[in-house]
Image (spheres, rainbow, N blue to C red):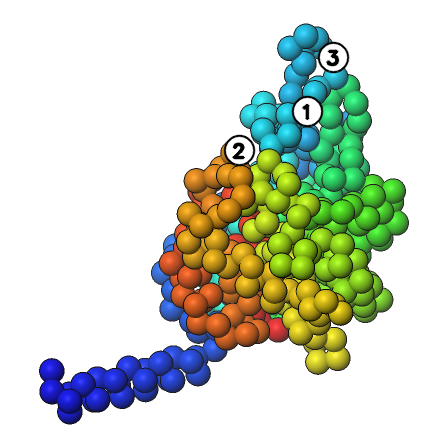
Amino acid sequence: MTKKYYFISVLFILCFQLAYADIPLSGKIKKVLKKEILKQAEWALLQQPVTVTASQCERSAGGVHDFFSEGDYWWPNPADLNGPYIQKDGLTNPENFTAHRKAMIRFSQVMGSLTSAYIITKEEKYVKHAMTHLKAWFIDTATFMNPSLLYAQAIKGKVTGRGVGIIDMIQMMEVAQGVRVMEKAKLINQNDLQKIKNWFADYLKWVTTHPYGIEERDAKNNHATCWVMQVAVFAKLVNNQQILDDCRNRFKTILLPNQMNKDGSFPLEIKRTKPYGYSLFNLDAMSTICHVLNNSKDNLWDFSLADNRSLKLAIDFLYPFVAKKKTWTYNPDVMYWNDWPVAQPFLLFGYYKYKNEKWLNTWKKMEHYPATEEVIRNLPVRNPLIWLED
């Protein structure tokens, strides 16, 4: 290649990079995911609502409208099959009741897909079908879910519900965000919109005052992070500024100082039996918190403690292990080790703030629609396009 053509080629590449850099993140996401989003939306258009009233478990102490789930790592005692369950940390019991959790995840997938397709096409058929599901879960007296998680993560022979079960409600975050997108587009009947918001307001009241909610809020690890994350998303939907301010304060004064090491790692997650998956999960949750709560007056992305611990430090620590998993220096996860990483939200939200092209390029290469149930469940943001509409 002559020098002339070499410099022309370099100039072309630079011009392309500069032009691409000016494309907003939503446009870059559409470029990567548009085909799959529309495919998922076509699936969603065929789905009829399935709420908690569609299945019941004889071990639930709640009623037909109550969400019920069982602790993942609790198993029958071989020495007493009719007695209380015993714990096997990190090992999921496949016989536990998960129908309500799966129904909620499915609801989230339907809402995320339909909302994403509406953003791309502006076709109101997606919103219309989404409303069918929203009414079933929040309005219809025959099928609605009670706005609480009194019976989540129960343990046979021990407790009818636990505060740790509140983490299951992160599946409702993309539902709430989908409603915000539709509200902004003025496509939801005001009466229906108010009823949906009332449901989330009632849940917020419960989760911020009930002993289960207080217990989960005050947890030491990813459970506390997920409490703040879901509460922030729901408070934004109902415009509860007091709760939003409290969530910002908790991130700065509790989550960051109590959970992050000076190198950016999360020691409470690393000591678990699934340190890799839990580290990803916690960083995804913290990044989502910063994305949702960030504003001109309180920039959580740029906040750092006196010893320089910050969310960017956490991304800098974990990113190399995502780009090259084989460099992971801690123990491998006892389950689902081969299923991580996927298109982690922290890569996308981190790029949105810091414009690090390496993070975005890594996100592009990852699996965007994982099939493993455990991965789906622990991926708080599965439809990134809907989070960029504010």
| Near-viewer residue (14 or 116) | 14
Crowding at dot 1, Cα within 10 Å, few <14 / some 14-19 / many 20+, comes out as some
The label number, if any, that marks residue 83 in the structure image: 3
Residue 29's spot in the image, x, y percent? 44, 67
Q: Amino acid at mark 3?
A: Gly
Q: CA distance from mark 1 to mark 2?
A: 15 Å
Q: Disc 3 or 2, which lies upstream in sequence?
A: 3
Q: Is residue 205 something that shows in the picture?
A: yes
Q: Are marks 1 and 2 in contact (CB under 8 Å)?
A: no
Position of 73 relative to 369 (above/below): above
> Can you tell which of label 3 and label 2 is closer to the viewer?
2
**Closer-to-camera residue (374/98):** 374
Among numbered discs 1 and 2, the one appearing first in the sequence = 1
Q: Which residue position is annotated with label 1? A: 87
The x, y position of residue 214, in whole percent, is 85, 47
Q: On the image, numbered disc 2 is attached to which residue?
A: 334
The spot of residue 324 in percent (x, y) is: 42, 53
Quadrant housing residue 75: top right
* 1 or 2: mark nearer the eye: 2
The span from disc 3 to disc 2 (Cα, nearest Å) is: 26 Å
Q: Is residue 44 left or right of residue 66?
A: left
Mark in the foreground, 1 or 3: 1
SS at mark 2 in the image: loop
Specify the quadrant of the image occupied by residue 358. Answer: bottom left
**Residue contact at pointers 1 and 3, CB within 8 angstroms:** no
The amino acid on which the numbered mark 2 sits, given as a three-letter code, is Val
Residue at the (73%, 35%) spot, across then down: 152
Residue 187, label in figure: none
Q: Residue at x 21, y 89 (%)?
A: 7
Q: CA distance from mark 1 to mark 3?
A: 13 Å
- The part of the image, by quadrant, that contains residue 316 is bottom right
The residue positioned farthest toward the left in the image shown: 1
